[in-house]
Amino acid sequence: MIEFRQVTKRYDSDHTALRQVSFELDRGELAFLTGHSGAGKSTLLKLLMVMERPTAGEVVVGGQRLNTLPKRQIPYLRRHIGVVFQNHQLLFDRTVFDNVAMPLEVMGVSPTDIGRRVRAALDKVGLLKKEKMNPMQLSGGEQQRVGIARAVVNKPPLLLADEPTGNLDPELSADIMHLFTQFSQVGVTVLIASHDIALINDMGRRRLTLDHGRLTAGAGSQVMPGGRV
Amino acid sequence: MATDSRQNADSQRGARQGRGAPASPVKQYLAHQRRVARDSARRLWQTPVATAMTWAVMGIALSLPVALLLLLGSLQGVSSGWESSARITAYIEMGVPLEKANELVLTVNGYGRVASVELIERGQALSEFRESSGLGDVLDFLEGNPLPHTLLITPEEGARTAKGVQSLATFIEGMDEIERVQVDLGWLQRLNAMTDILTRAAWALALLLAAAVVLVIGNTVRLAIESRRDEILVAKLVGGTDAFVRRPFLYTGAWFGLGGGVVAWLLIQVTFWWLSGPIERLAGLYNSDFSLNGPGLEGVFALIVIAMLLGWLGAWVAVKRHMDDIDPGDIAGG
């Protein structure tokens, strides 16, 4: 589903965010991306979203080489990638329902279909009863779940999460992780950037570790101890 | 694989549409356009004061050149009306006898393009002058009649243009017994020249103010873009195309244009209504049936359409300049 081939990303100055990173993620695989802050986690996610282009090497998502993807094709690629952010990026000028509906509206889905699919996604994260509320009225954990509902509402084959549990207590974090596991079980490839070591150890999934832009662990798709279910 | 999954997604969507309420892509697209248009209008409605101010600025900027052009159009109507009553006065040389003058009448008539030729005998001219000028006593001191025989020539209808009248005047001037030809067209030409200059000036003004309108709308839409920055970011993140992100702002510009056009029309109507009384009185003093012509139905329609286009253009400029600055990379965090 995802393949990095000798990917290097250098920003204008001497700052090199990623150095010759290579790895593969299969369909339905759930993996963590860890490393100290500034190790290149966000850069790696940005490359997948084509917010940045690699300086060298190739990024392939779903068989498509992103290096050569024309700019006007980028929106169509993003419709196949769900993203969850630490600060969840919800819009407070509209209801929970309207927030979750955005990816569908962008695709021009008809209002009846939007209603059905948004409610299905909200049901999945357990917030069906709060669809008419403003996200501001929700707790941190609930807001993050709204963000997840928005990321999965159009059933993308790839789900990226950037510190999705950053602001949550361990119990809520476990809830969120459970959701991600469920998605991977139905074939969604999930990549979670996190430095919540305890949580990652609990999950016992594949771990990609970045250190100053180099991938120091998890490059091969070998099964980690206590690995894939 | 991405293409695979996209095809899958598309075929799923297709299948769903087949089962549910059948909606053609065109219909869905139009429904989406309607929703966006309505949403943009609703947003303007939510900030009534700011919206009204933008409308007023636009209305004033548009009404000024349009009112000027309408006024000049009315003036041109006047001059063409007066042109039709253009007459040529030809003074015959002093020594020419009455019989010869009568021959001249025939000659001028023979030229063609002449509706009528009237001979005013010098005696008759003197008595008319005595009556109208009130200088009777002064005239009594003169030894003889200082006035010549005079021809009053009215060109035929087809020749009542500045050019036609001029060529007729040249012909009459060329005749031996004619002392001097006077065409009462000079002032008309001056008026025409002046309206020409003013019309050009009005168009220049219109262009400048149209540019100003585009800039004003551009700036207003820029603020709207700023205030919806988060929404644009999210829309771009979840795969909104540039066209999708742009659309609401283009509608906003068009709605500004619609309001501005209506305000301009109202301003013109009120101004013309306010001016109509004095202008009729003035025209009455000149024995003219001059009146201000309003824009008319097509004029109003054109005004509003042009205003909407200008608004749209302003929005487009703003969107083009500022949309690319909003890059979803900013929120992906460090």
Image (cartoon, coloured by chain):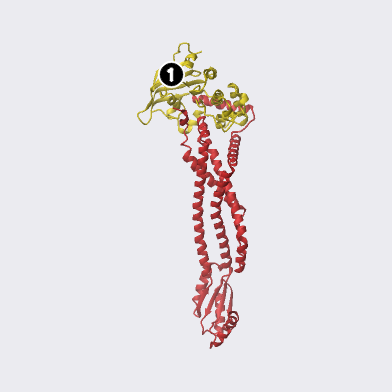
Residue situated furthest bottom in the rendering? B143
A175 is higher (above) or lower (below) than B51: above
Q: Callout 1: few (<14), some (14-19), or many (20+) C-alpha neighbours within 10 Å?
A: many
Q: Can you tell which quarter of the image residue A129 is in?
A: top right
Instruction: Specify the subunit that label 1 lies on.
Output: A
Q: Quadrant of the C terminus of chain B?
A: top left
Q: Nearer the viewer, residue B213 or A142?
A: A142
Q: Quadrant of residue A137?
A: top right
Residue shown at 59% from the left, 77% from the top: B118
Give how far across and how far down residue B260 sits, in percent. Answer: 57, 48
Colour of chain B as rendered: red
Kindly identify the residue that appears in the image at 50 percent across and 44 percent down. Answer: B219
Q: Amino acid at mark 1?
A: Leu
Q: Is residue B329 shown above or below B161?
A: above
Residue B24: x, y in percent? 61, 33
Lateral position of residue A146 relative to residue A221, left or right: right
Q: Which residue is mark 1?
A: A208
> Looking at the image, which residue sits at the far right?
B21
**Whole-percent x and y of residue A103?**
55, 29
Residue furthest toward the top?
A226
Residue B13 visible (yes or no): yes
Of the pair A80 and B325, the residue shown nearer to us:
B325
Identify the residue at horizontal 49%, vertical 55% (top origin).
B204
Mark 1 lies on a secondary structure that is: strand
Considering depth in this image, is A55 or A86 the residue closer to the camera? A86
Residue B295 seen by the camera: no
Q: Which chain does yellow denote in the image?
A: A
User: Horizontal and vertical percent for residue A57?
Assistant: 39, 25
